[in-house]
Image: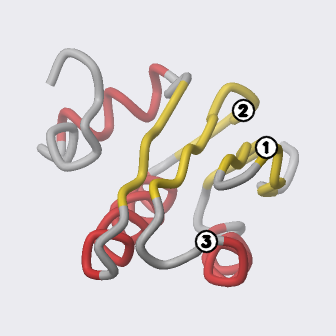
Amino acid sequence: MTEGSIQAVGEHQFALSGSLSFASVRSLWLRGQMLFDEGETISLDLKEVTHTDSAGLALLVEWVCVLQRAKGRLQLHNVPQQLSVIARTSRMDELLQLDGS
């Protein structure tokens, strides 16, 4: 399993890849703090995410909350089915604004 990473792909646009799990979320959280501008709409593509668990969901929820407090927004794209299921089960799909929520 590849450790999770985040890369800038454009202005306020980022791509997550690899694993979003307990082992990777701390480093992803710290990297996101350095990359995300307050008050901006951040676009995050999850197409290359290979695995996720509840820690990965918690990371995305925290990013949503931090950006909302700073008058920004997080837009998720290409959300893996595994993450959608975890989000729906924990009733976080609406907060994450996932399709079909």
Sort mark 2 into few (<14), some (14-19) or many (20+) by Cα contacts within 10 Å. Answer: some
Instruction: Give me the C-alpha separation between circle 3 and circle 1.
Output: 19 Å
Contact, CB < 8 Å: mark 3 with mark 1?
no
Q: In this view, does 90 lie to the left or right of 31?
A: left
Counting from the top left corner in percent of width and height, residue 79 is at 50, 27
19 or 35, nearer to the observer: 35
Identified at 36% across, 29% down, the residue is 84
Tell me the residue that label 1 is attached to: 18
Q: In this view, does 65 lie to the left or right of 53?
A: left
Counting from the top left corner in percent of width and height, residue 57 is at 41, 53
Q: What residue type is labelled 3?
A: Phe
Sort mark 3 into few (<14), some (14-19) or many (20+) by Cα contacts within 10 Å. Answer: many
Q: What residue type is labelled 1?
A: Gly
Q: Quadrant of residue 61?
A: bottom left
Counting from the top left corner in percent of width and height, residue 86 is at 32, 38
> What colouring does the structure picture have?
secondary structure
Identified at 65% across, 37% down, the residue is 51
- The numbered dot on residue 50 is 2
Q: What residue type is labelled 2?
A: Thr
N-term-proximal mark, 2 vs 3: 3
Where's the N terminus, which quadrant? Answer: top right
Instruction: Judge depth for marks 3 and 1 and give the one in front.
Output: 3
N-term-proximal mark, 1 vs 2: 1
- The numbered dot on residue 36 is 3
Q: Is residue 86 above or below residue 16?
A: above
Sort mark 1 into few (<14), some (14-19) or many (20+) by Cα contacts within 10 Å. Answer: some
Q: Is residue 10 above or below residue 4?
A: above
Q: Is residue 15 left or right of residue 65?
A: right
